[in-house]
Amino acid sequence: MVEAHSAAAAVGATDPALLALAGKAAWAILLTPLICAVAILLVGIHRKSFAMAAAVGGLATSLICTLFLFFQASQGHLAVPFEVSVTWISLGGLSIPFGVLIDNLSLIMTLVVTGIGSGIFLYSVGYMHDDAAASRYFGMLSLFAFSILTIVLSTNWIQLFIGWELVGFCSYMLIGHWYAKPSAAAAGNKAFIVNRVADFGFIIGILWLWSVSSTASDDRTVHFATLMARLPVLVESGAVPVATLSVIGLLLFCGPVGKSAQFPLHVWLPDAMEGPTPVSALIHAATMVAAGVYMLCRTFWLFEMIPSTLNVILYVGAATAFLAAALGFAENDLKRILAFSTLSQLGYMVMAIGLGGPVAAMYHLTTHACFKALLFLGAGSVIHGTHEQNIWKLGGLTRSMRWTSLTFLIGSLALIGFPGLSGFFSKDEILVLAREHNLPIYLLATLTAGMTAFYTGRLWFVAFMGKGHAHGHESPPVMLGPLFFLAGLSVVAGYIGIPAWLGEHHEAFHWDVALTSTAAVAAGVTISWLLYSKRAIAAGSLVRALALPQSFVENRYYIDDIYTWYVQNIQQKIIAAGCAWFEQNIIIGAVNAVAALAQGLGRLLRLFQTGVVQTYVLVFVAGVLWLITRYLAVR
Amino acid sequence: MSINAWLLPLILFAPAVGALLLTLIPENRPDLVRRVAVLVTGISLAGALHAIFHYQTAAGGFQYEVLKPWLPQLGIQFHLGVDGIGVVLLLLHALCGFTGVLISYSIKQRVKEYYIFYLTLITGVFGVFMSLDLFCFYFFYEMAVIPMYPLIGIWGSDVKEEGRVKYSKQYATMKLTIYLTLGAVVALVGLLALYQWTGAQTFDIPTLQAMLADEPLSTAQQRWIFPLLFIGFGVIAPMWPFHSWSPMGHAAAPSAVSMLHAGVLMKLGSYAIIRIALPLLPQGAVYWLPWVASIVVMNILYGGFVALAQKDLKLIVGYSSSSHMGYVLLGIACLTPLSLTGAVMLMFGHGIMTALAFAIIGQLYDQTHTRWLPDLGGLAHQIPFIAGCGVIAAMASSGLPGFANFVSELLVFMGGWDKYPVQIVCGALGVVITSVYMLRVVRGTFFGPSKPEFEGHVHDAKTPFEKLPFIILVLALLITGSWPGPMLRLLESSTGPLVERILMNEPNTAPDSIQVHSPAKPGHASASNEHSEMN
Amino acid sequence: MVTVTHYVVASAALFCIGLAGVMSRRNVLMILLCVELMLNAANLLFVAYSKAWGNLHGQMIVFFVITVAAAEVTVGLAIAILMMRQRNTLDADAVQSMKW
Amino acid sequence: MDLSLLRVELCVAVWIFVLLAADVFLAPAKKEGLSWLALAGIGIALVVSLQPLPIGPAPTGLFALDGVSHYFKPLFLATAAAVILMTQAFRPQMPQHPGPFYVLLFTSVLGALILSSIQDLILLFLGLELLTFSLYIMAAYLKTDGRSVEAGMKYLILGSVSSALLVYGIALLYGAVGDTSFAAIRAFLASGELTLAAQTGILLVLAGLGFKLAAVPFQLWLPDVYEGAPAPVVAFLAVGSKMAGAVALMRLLFLALAPIQPWWSPILASLSVLTLLYGNLGALGQRNLKRLLGYSSIGHAGYLLMGFAVGTLDSARAVAFYLLAYLVSTLAVFLIVCAATDELGGDDLDHYAGLSRRSPGLAAAFFIALLSLAGVPPLAGFVGKLLVLMSAVAADRLWLAGIGAVNVAISLYYYLMVVKRMYVDAPPSPSPVRVPAASLLALGALILLILGIGICQAPFLSRINLALIF
């Protein structure tokens, strides 16, 4: 049933034994977390330590298998792309495989997921140690790992969609992990439903793409490799108009808009911070929200055929990057600032796709995963130590939580693009791309880089540097370990040649772009330093000067309010209540009316039944006369 | 004699015999009564499992056939048999029936009478799913409707809105019974017309099918009969705007009856359409189904919106059922092998899912005595196991991958895309609406801070026996949903040929090709021979 | 000359008078008498047709009808007595405890 | 004249005298035994009626012992037996002197037996009168009960008017044909002549029979009489009298009026529709069980008329089956009503509240019998209705079948209202309802028959197919 086939043409033949082993390893990457999740949910739901061990062990196994494949591939022993799959559904002309696609792209993403994921899992062991429902947490975490790997390793659109939905579910469960908090439960709902709205477009796109994918000789397909080969031919022959494909592309892009929280469906991500912090780090910073970007990279062969859709993607990404960064200015919640930052960085990545640079996007995705996970874990460490999330109530953490602060600083620097750190390189790639293709976007992106520096600076100066009242205790080693690990990654990720691995030959360093962005960053940091550390400018007066934009930003552009208004007034009060009214009064009313009609007709007929015998005779005789007059026929 | 020859009668008559046995058991022995019910439904379940595992997919067609003359003067036979579709629905019903018996342990009043009616209901539904004779079919169909009346009337509960009675259980059950009977008699007229106009003097479905393949009814006749059958059976399906009996019926019924009702009874309609209306009246189907495809969009969206406005848990799930049955009807209306397979799969998936949902709501209601959403909340603290099942049911209903509902809805969408893209898009929108109200239910019921009034006297399903029905249903959903291949192959062996035969009748196809594609099976030919000898 | 038609007309008239009486008279006894009138109208018809056809079927029936009519009156009187005993009236319209 | 043709009727007639004599000579304390004597008489007649038909040429003359009558006679006798058992169960309500009641019952049965064999309009008239006269008295049998007397009075007046119309119709027909035998009428009509007088005559005869069947617009007496008359009498009215009317109509239509079937078919069809709707709609919202059953019996007359309107051999057979199913179900219902009226304190629907808690078996039997009347599988009534509807569809009267089918759903409503009282409502007292053993036995047999006819229809239908040949 399992069929392994390798596109071995690229780098010579692969040793069959290795191929078999690689196939097993590939399956192991995907399925180990699933098995662990099932085991935890079935037998470990009341055994916390078993759950922790299974979850961490499961993902670690995946990581080891990934590393194995990675080294085999990088050494050239294993020819990639390489695919193993089983047929999940085979029905008439429809065949949906379920499998593992190993190539450079999926390997790097799998490394991100399993590598950073393992760190975060380990961190969770410390973070969730006292939680009564830790087993459920770890079960869901394992299930999440499986789901995201389903996306990453997917060989086809449907499998991708399956993973897409499953990560949504896990995200829902994990955001709402502390379901006793109404806000957490609400945030979970919001995340799931917003993603559902987006996936509505996504699945339509998938269906449409599937429906146009047939050729004269072959059935329709959802298989990436087949589509990649087939679509250009179909477009060239005119069988699929570019306009149609553009619409399909837009519909497909709906998926990332929801999952990667692009404008205007970004509203769920800040709320998602209600979940435990490791979840925010893993799901809502490093992996799941990046899945949208990954999907666009994975299927870039489709999007590169439709420049108009790419343009839309570009502007959506740029808008998200800029607007989300601005939202970071006014936020006071430690995790939410990071969430807006995540939004903004995701905007960068999407923008990079729009600019035609999947490699740049993927590069930024990888580095961002490292430093943003680091930042969140750092924030988690702070929360764990102080039980406080409001930056204004924190402060002075550099003293009480030294190691956490150090790693947080490294993450922050990587985020703002401090030269030499990973964020600097990856952001630079995108800015170069922007300058080549679209000057206004370039300027906007540079400005956004400055804004990033500003709010990150604000966070640092207020929460960590400020005159401390928060006396937290440093976190246990099981939590610090991952912090160091991720800090290390954030430093080195810029140097290990990710773009080259992804197939882009690194061009010469663009000093002009680098300098400009560094200047913007420096400006941002300086301003924030002046405002929040040095207090040279009174923040209050600045706020007053910018009253209107301030309220606009504080209310998150009123987008949440618009949605709430829609749900409460349009959806519930007009559509749903209208339908319910129609149901009660027209549909049920009509049925009742028929019943009443029957009753009434009966009552009417019974008017003959006067109880007076002579009425009966009269009716009798009238009946006879009626019969005679009606049916007497002359022949 | 091999087991195959008496497998279906065993499944069918086990509950009936159980009901008869119960009449002999004194009323003051409720435990014995329950045990008998568990035993007989268990036998049926085992039989259904045996049937599905031993169905010869490669051979296809009707299997485990039983053919006995019944009323030879009219060409009526006691003809049982199941194809891939039937065997799946048999399993669905056996699962729902068995778990329903377990859930019914919470019934404390008039236990004996309850199980007698309940087992009669189960017998009727089994009969429908395995009947291959129109008379048999109708016979069991009506038999399945009537026990609902006392079941809801006696053991049900009023549907309340903010403390006031919105629909009394008497109203709900009377409406349900009369509405369904009305639908059934409309269908009966259609069936009789079919019998008459065919001139075959037989009610045997395979024989009729073979005959009609050779000499189809005239297009005009088909166009007359088809709506009779479709509306008649559509009432129970339930097709918009004939659905209003269903949500309030679900809401008023005791939980095990809601389970059977929403889980299985509603599938009788769509099953009847697939088993009778489509194969026997292909041209009628081709003519009317485009209309149906548009009407059922109303089912999906309208049902969803009304569910959004409800606050009674059972009404929400009730309207959700009518919304989801829209997908089933849409799958039928699209009339492609994919969509039809998806429709039947959804009948299974939705049946199990909704049975699970009603089992959960039943547990909640038994303990909290309310189903009014604003009164509930935070129950995950007290009943984590049931809450977990609740999340699973909600997710299955929202079409989360891993559950049978996702696969089936996907197949309906893929199968119907070419024919009715607009309707499919609307259908996909329905999935979004579903998740909105389902998550609202989960959040409002299970999440939030623990409420003091529930603390201490709301108990989770603790023992394995109490958990058993939930586990069975969840596993059924998960297994078929995550590995749908075997069930789909089973269904395809029946839906594929069915659709193929119907589409042969598209006006633009040469009629000559009909005979090539629908050879009468040897078994059926002999059946018709027997019949002609009797005359 | 008197033809069958004359008898038919006469009997029809008699029948209609009886019918009108049944519908208009309130006294049970009068109603029964009017029914007698209708039966006798039929008798007249039988006899006339019997003469016209030249067979005896009609006349034979007349005897039966007369007997039946007598029986009917007997039963009727018995019930009328019961009515009288219970309600102290013979008015048919007064008895209407069961209706609708 | 071959008296063996009259053997059943003779048995019954002789037993009338036996009963009279016994009534005279038995001591008042032993009058209870009369019912057993009556039962014995019915038993003898039943055995005689079940003797196989003499083989010979198709009988001619006034009276025939043919397949039709051979099929129906045992049914009349069985009805009578059931009614006698009902009087036992109903005893607390009955007057002290049951003797005349049984005599009247036997007379009535004699009329019905004759009607099942008629070949001539004279015998039609005589049979009807014999049947009806006794019923007038029986309806008013509870001399002290005002409603019973009222029922008798209403039945008497309407009945005598209808018989006057019938006789006048016979006279007109005789005038047109010159003969009263069915064969002669058939020959006359077959010749293509259909004078206005003949048509009027036929319509009047149909009206007279319509009165027996309770066809709209000749049905108004029925609810009142059902409500007022003693329950056993109502049972005989509902089953015996209606079935007698139906047999007479069947014989008239198929033996005498067959040639002008296209003429009377639409008449009966429209009567059928009106009757169905009147009966079933009128029954909605009734509060008295007997009155409700009255309306329901009008509804059933509608189905019978539908079978006649179709006018095919199959439809006649369907009617015969329908009557059988109707008989077993209705008798079961009335056995329960008779047994329960006294203990429940009346025959309003509300009196039946909580019967299932008081006497589960009785309630279950009632449930089954009512559902059979409604036409729900797997019960006898379902098959009867199905056969009638099928015959209508077979004659291309889809609309008629449609109306009949819809009425099934309407009727279910009021039957279920009774079920609701029994099963859902709370009982006023927990004491069980006592039923005499013989009635219980009969009830059990009837319920078994309801199920048996519903599930194994084939032998019954074969019997009918053999018997009914016109």
Image (cartoon, coloured by chain):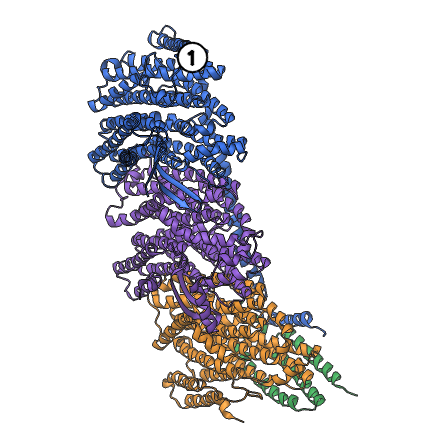
Residue A20 placement: quadrant: top left
Residue B293 image point, x, y percent: 52, 47
Q: Residue at x 36, y 10 (%)?
A: A525
Q: Amino acid at mark 1?
A: Val
Please rate how many residues cluster around mark 1, counting C-alpha atoms within 10 Å: few if below 14, some from 14 to 19, many from 20. Answer: some
User: D389 or B346: nearer the eye?
Assistant: B346
Residue A77 placement: quadrant: top left
- Residue marked by disc 1: A543
The answer to whether residue C70 is left or right of residue A274 is right
- Say if residue C86 shows up in the picture: no
Residue D307 image point, x, y percent: 55, 71
Chain B shade in the render? purple
Chain under disc 1 = A
Q: Residue at x 51, y 37 (%)?
A: A574
Residue B156 image point, x, y percent: 38, 53
Task: Tell me the blue chain.
Answer: A
Quadrant where the N terminus of chain A is found in the figure: top left
The answer to whether residue A11 is left or right of residue D249 is left
Quadrant where the C terminus of chain A is found in the figure: bottom right
In the displayed image of the protein, which residue is found farthest to the bottom? D1
Task: Tell me the green chain.
Answer: C
In the displayed image of the protein, which residue is found farthest to the top? A536
